[in-house]
Image (spheres, rainbow, N blue to C red):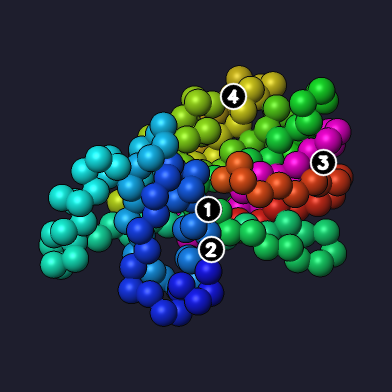
Amino acid sequence: AAQLGQRCDVTVVVGGDGTMLGIARELAQFDMPLIGINQGRLGFITDIPVDRFREALAPMVRGEFEEEHRAMLDASVWRGDECTSVALNDVVVTRGATAGMVELRVDIGDEFVANMRADGLIVASPTGSTAYSLSAGGPILHPGIRGWLLVPNAAHTLSNRPIVLPDDGEVRITVVSGRDVSANFDMQSLASLMHGDQVRMK
């Protein structure tokens, strides 16, 4: 990935949205344009059908294209030392499959927001607003809007509703209680969490 990032002008990703998310995380640091050819089931971000790739790529090579910038979540798990993983779509803090609810403290910047009891909590970028966040009842956020979504998954309290946040502050989620708690990054990278662990996102 490092050689691609340093030597190439553009990357053509053939697969589904999951493939695009994995490559985007690898190449984000190089600020490289990505072109998605859809060979999977979903095509939200790999939106060129595989049977039309020739007619779509030819004008792009000639310089006829529209570039769209997408915000990414930079998340780190804190337990003494920092462990960082970059996500494009979302970060999901969730309970184990056979465990009860988790209790999570949410802070934005230096401001306490809430203690939430739920099956989990999703923080999503505009790109991620059409993924797991949407299934959990969150709104669709246009990519041109600079914000994050904070979406409780099966919240214990009905007043805990999805919230749209500005993307200029750091979101911190602290594990207060619960068993088998984990943090998922684009549902492709996983970190097990203990009580007191904190997931920080910006």
Q: What amino acid type is highlighted by mark number 1?
A: Gly
Q: What amino acid type is highlighted by mark number 3?
A: Val
Q: Nearer the viewer, residue 89 or 153?
A: 89
The answer to whether 75 is drawn above or below residue 62 in the figure is above
Measured from the top left, where is residue 125 in percent x and y?
47, 47
Whole-number angstrom distance, CA of label 1 to CA of label 3: 30 Å
Contact check, label 1 and label 2, Cβ < 8 Å: yes
Measured from the top left, where is residue 63 in percent x and y?
15, 67
Q: According to the image, label 3 marks what residue?
A: 176
Is the residue marked by circle 4 packed among few (<14), some (14-19), or many (20+) residues within 10 Å?
few
Whole-number angstrom distance, CA of label 1 to CA of label 2: 7 Å
Q: According to the image, label 2 marks what residue?
A: 26
Contact check, label 1 and label 4, Cβ < 8 Å: no
Is the residue marked by circle 3 packed among few (<14), some (14-19), or many (20+) residues within 10 Å?
some
Which image quarter holds the C terminus?
bottom right
Q: Image check: 129 left or right of 159?
A: left
Q: Would you say residue 42 sits in the magenta stretch? A: no
Contact check, label 2 and label 4, Cβ < 8 Å: no
Image: magenta residue range: 167-185
Whole-number angstrom distance, CA of label 2 to CA of label 4: 38 Å
Measured from the top left, where is residue 151 in percent x and y?
55, 34
- Point 86% across, 45% down: residue: 195
Answer with mark 2 or mark 3, whichever residue precedes in sequence.
2
Nearer to us of marks 3 and 4 is 3
The answer to whether 6 is drawn above or below residue 152 in the figure is below
Q: According to the image, label 4 marks what residue?
A: 159
Q: How many marks?
A: 4
